[in-house]
Image (spheres, helix red, strand yellow):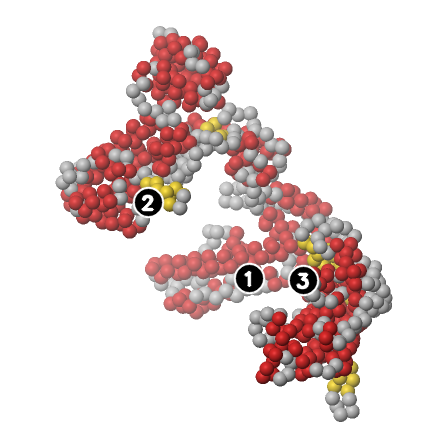
Amino acid sequence: MLTPLNFEPLRKKYIKKKEENMSHPPGYPYSKEEFKDLKERHEKLQKFLDTDYKGLKVWHLPDDIKEYLIQVSTPSYRQLALIKIDEIKAQTKQLIKDCKALEKKKPEERTLRAGHIAQILARDMVYLRKHHQHIKDGKVHHSKLNDEEYNRLQNLLAYFQKDDIQAHLDQYRLLELHPFLKDVKLENSKNLYEYYKKYLEKRKEYFIGVYDSIDLFAPIFKKAEQYLKKFHGVNKDEKDKKVKKSLLELKKALFNFDRQVIKIFLKNYITDWKGINLGNCKNAEDFCFHVFSIEKEFKDKTFFNIDELQNKLGYLFDFKYQENQPEKLDKNYAQIPIALPSSLFKDAIIEGIEKAMQKEGKKLTFGKDEEGNEKRTVVYALREWLENDTQVFYTHNRHYKMPEKSKEIFSKEQIKRIECQVISLENRKELYHYKELSLYEWIDKPEKYDKLKEIAQKDALKKFRSYLLSTEKVLRLEQHKDRVLWLLAKDLSENRTQGTNLDFKNFKLKDLEKFLDTPIKMEVKVNYIVDKEDIAVNNAISGKPCTSEKQLIEVGAVSETLKIKDYGDLRRFAKDRRLPNLFRYFYDVKSKGEALSKTELEKAITLLEVRNLIQRNEDGSKIFKDKITVLEKAMELEQLLHEKYGQPDTDFENTRLGKYWKQEQPKDSHISHNTYIKFLQDKTLGIDLNINPIVGMDGAQHLNNDKELAKSKRTHPEQTLEACLIILLRNKLIHNEVPYTTFLQSKMQADFTPEQVVRQIIDESMRIYDQLIAEVKKQTA
């Protein structure tokens, strides 16, 4: 784990955004000394990283971690407030200075307008107005001027209509909630400019007082300096050095609030303060308030504690109270999101490429930039390593056409020559490597010199060159991506312990098309989603308990010999929602996870998608046996029940079927298949629903091992197992799914193929509906 380097804590100063008309020295927000110190800290940190974390740069680190390591701490709320008010003071001073400079100019040279003054005043009045609090619905709300009210205030100020301005200020309580606006007398001002100057003077006076009330340490250090000058010697130069050194000790001690150091310092230098009980001081600010209570000159002055500062001036600042925030040392850095910079592993990658080239008997040499520094980039290294190994189309000639406007300033021969020159890959490389090379050198110059035409031609060729190089840059990036993907795929295949391994040894990137056309046997897993309730299914598939609400469990694999480039087709096929249930029929009769041929599975699924002709009658009619045949049988059963128990249609609700349908409380006039099947359970019909699907297992066992059947029974307890099974079969088929149920699994044989499984499902479903139709036909309405 990284630990902070051995530095004295440095208090960071910052403000979120700079105010207008403010200029800052280099190194802002630090002083010159602090900035120099910060630079040294960065250099020491970089040396530490170079030793233990090769390739990691200081600027790679997130700000929080970097500041933690170099011991830069976040400023307190009071310090942030001082910085903000210092900027407001500087801004006010600049505005007053602008007014004085304006007055020195001649009237016709003055550029300050009423609209601009009104905008400054309105914006500042709204900014400094304390938010009015009111309670609504039990919550505290802070009211501000909306856009319309603000625009109205600005307009009134611009036209300087005193009565209307006064009414507006009273209406929105600006005089009451603004800290000094009531002291700027509107009635004593002849015009807007005079009112503006008075406002700025009051603004300056107010914030000087506020700054003095917030700054606790400046008067403390000033008073301490007076005591130290009395204590130290008579020699002025020597005294100044000792005073400066002693003050620095006091500042460090207060910054860290080291009680022991402060106690010794007071005992040695300022005996008037040694009576302060440091045990009662929670922090350096408490110590300052104890000093203010001792010294007479501070008794008439007002100093804000942190709560007063927050309550009285907090609305001016756009940062939150931070005094009680945990220190950076207490943060859990493992949970801080980190965006890794793209160049983090640059040195390691280049080092790997150099070793790979050495094995091939090559040496990696970098080009140099204009300043003579090596271009150590991954892109350059890859290009050197795989210079002759790339897809053929990247080396083809490319035709770039000059824009139509060029015909106005170039002759046909000149355009043709330029376009022919950039076809060559070598010439395009030359343009890229030599920035000073101009396309103008490649055209024939006219005998008669025309300076304006030459300027126009150079400008046009400069734009054409820029367009050409930007297009080439995009193509080089794609080429670079292809090389990286090739190397990643090669490395992944060589280090793979399971799945399909591709043979890269006999191929290069330039043979990519040939490589992708190579046929190999490949497999893709087929997964089944189970949840915690699927106890039996879970055990049958994995033998392990479900560790989450939903879990993917492998049920098998699809295999096929295909071209490498067709792997995506196999993956898409493996995600077919019909496959998991189809694979489940092979749990007990085949080894778990055995791969099934894609061709065999496609034959099985085809029976659920297209008509399956089994024979032709003498009259030429066709006989089918497929999913649609089963659904036709279901419709035949519905029609038969309607004819027997739902006639006449004119008084359907009073028929036996109609009365049962009405009990179901239907949402519309449609009679669902579920209603017809449940209607068959009516014992008064005399229909035998014993369709004999159960073989070697009782109903309870089926419910324990068949999730969907158990869910159907749980949702509709009034239904028999047989009714649940029939509804489940028909719903799965109509929704283009393979129905799975242990009733059907018991009908399967060990040597069944996937196609035979689907045929058996269709046969069994048709047998069930045929049996029900025969039972209904026996009955009389």
Answer with mark 1 or mark 2, whichever residue precedes in sequence: 2
Quarter holding the N terminus is top right
Residue tagged 3? 715
Q: Position of residue 735 (x, y in %)?
A: 66, 70
Q: Which mark is residue 424?
A: 1
Amino acid of disc 2: Lys
SS assignment at label 1: loop
List the single residue furthest toward the bottom: 619
Q: What is the spatial separation of the Cα atoms under label 2 and label 3, in whole angstroms?
A: 57 Å
Residue toward you, 306 or 687: 687
Sequence-first tag of 2 and 3: 2
Q: Residue at x 36, y 17 (%)?
A: 293
Residue 707, given in percent of the width and then of the height, sits at 73, 60
The answer to whether any part of residue 384 appears in the image is: no
> In the rendered image of this protein, does residue 378 appear above or below residue 729?
above
Mark 3 residue element: helix
What's the residue type where badge 3 is placed? Thr
